[in-house]
Amino acid sequence: MKKNIKHLFGIFLLLLLINSCKEKDYVLGSLTAPQNIVITAVIAGQDATHPNGDGSGNVAITITADNALAYYVDYGTSSTVNLVNLPTGSGTKKYTQLGLNTYRITAVVYGKGGTSSTLTKDIQVQSNFIPDAAIVTNLTGGTSKTWAVDPSVPGQFGVGPWSNSSVTPEWWSAAVNEKVACCNCFYTAHFTFTKNSNGTYTLAVTTPDGAFTKTGSLAGGLPGIPSSGGEACYAYGGGSGAFSFIPASTGLPASTPSTQTSINLAGVNTFIGYGALQKEYEIMVLTSTYMYLRVQGTETGNAWYLKLKAL
């Protein structure tokens, strides 16, 4: 009897071992791409009298879809696609291009197994902005004023993450006169801001020792900059172009500090301080003698900081 029990127990163990060696079948389920995408854009102040909003440029955007796991949106503000994650499918955007403009919102919704679906929606948004008179006066002197990067103060140049949760050059900050030895053109370049009689604004850039920039596509579109070489001074004849004041697109609070106003450059012939920057310079602090700017770099994820003095 005991032998039979041992025999049966041995067979049971053998069957258990064989069963455990079998490959398991995993079922992913249906890989159905997200369906029934809807983009809802609510423009602040929109009514029958103001179909394109109240001029603030604020738009609340919501994306919904069936079978959705993640939502991404491109707000349609540039010629290149820049997808931003919306964890809940909802977010807000301040459109700052002055006047009445059409933007194409693109929603990309991801589902199981990396499946995705896309939908676009065009909206027209009115953006009106009148800068504080003190900002205009401090920047232009009422007519014309010239500025230069100030080598005598620490942090005249710095970099940190492009994020509203970080508004300091936490990655690196220049010491006093740090760029004199390698790139003194950084300090000898002059930037003259002019208020024209017709109410428009012009920036003239003078670069007697060249432009301080990176090469190739990182040069911010400055014409004539070579396609290879490190960060340095490069021959650049300067230039002039229009600029406008716009509400800062970051939405940073005034306590940051921020004036909540940006200088927005037009064209490719002008820059402020460093030639590898985007065209919107948020004015963090501005007095009659001192200007502190924050601007997104042409390298993704970088926020650059500049301190200038009036000449």
Image (cartoon, rainbow, N blue to C red):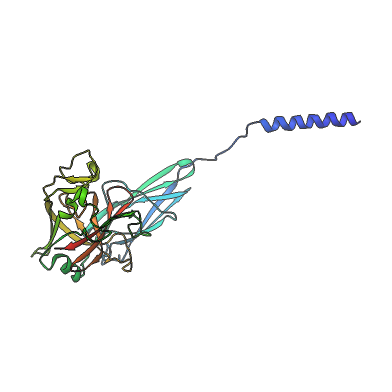
Q: Nearer the viewer, residue 165 or 83?
A: 165
- Answer with the quarter of the image where residue 223 lies: top left
Query: Residue drawn at (24%, 56%), measured in percent from left and top?
Result: 280
> Residue 292 location in percent, x, y?
25, 62
Q: Nearer the viewer, residue 238 or 111?
A: 238
Left or right of 28 in this view: 137 = left
Left or right of 11 in this view: 78 = left
Q: Nearer the viewer, residue 39 or 133?
A: 133
- Answer with the quarter of the image where residue 45 lies: bottom left
- Answer with the quarter of the image where residue 63 lies: bottom left
The residue sitting at the front extreme is 181
Q: Nearer the viewer, residue 152 or 167?
A: 152
> Residue 258 location in percent, x, y?
29, 65
The residue sitting at the left extreme is 197
> Residue 181 location in percent, x, y?
21, 49
Quadrant location of the N terminus? top right
Vertical comparison of 10 with 180: above or below: above
Query: Residue drawn at (31%, 66%), measured in percent from left and top?
Result: 257
Vertical comparison of 16 with 123: above or below: above
